[in-house]
Amino acid sequence: MTTGLDFWLGNGPAYVGSPETVAKRLEKQHQLIGFDVFCGRHRFGEIASPLVEKSIRLFGEKVIPALL
């Protein structure tokens, strides 16, 4: 099983970008397959903790409300 960041970026399951970009990609995937549960991973490799915290905060403050 390939789990590296290059795999995730190259094959589509990684949602990377602005909150607006991530929300649009999640909405598109939802329309295609109809999932009702999303499990996100905000830490990859050596990403510093403050950047992980920022990612989680933006997801909660911007992405989730855009999907409701």
Image (cartoon, rainbow, N blue to C red):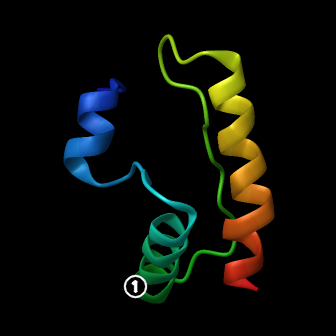
**In percent of the image, x 67 and y 68: which residue is there?**
63
Q: Is residue 10 above or below residue 20?
A: above
Residue nearest the viewer, comparing 39 with 18: 18
**In percent of the image, x 69 and y 18: which residue is there?**
49
The amino acid at mark 1 is Leu
Q: Is residue 33 above or below residue 56?
A: below
Residue nearest the viewer, comparing 24 with 31: 24
- The picture places residue 19, in percent across and down from the top left corner, at 57, 63
Determine whether, in the image, residue 12 is placed left or right of residue 50.
left
**Which residue carries the number 1 mark?**
32
- The picture places residue 28, in percent across and down from the top left corner, at 42, 82
Specify the farthest residue to the top. 46
Crowd around label 1: few <14 · some 14–19 · many ≥20 (10 Å)? few
Residue nearest the viewer, comparing 16 with 54: 54
Q: Quadrant of the C terminus?
A: bottom right
Residue nearest the viewer, comparing 41 with 63: 63
Helix, strand, or loop for circle 1? helix
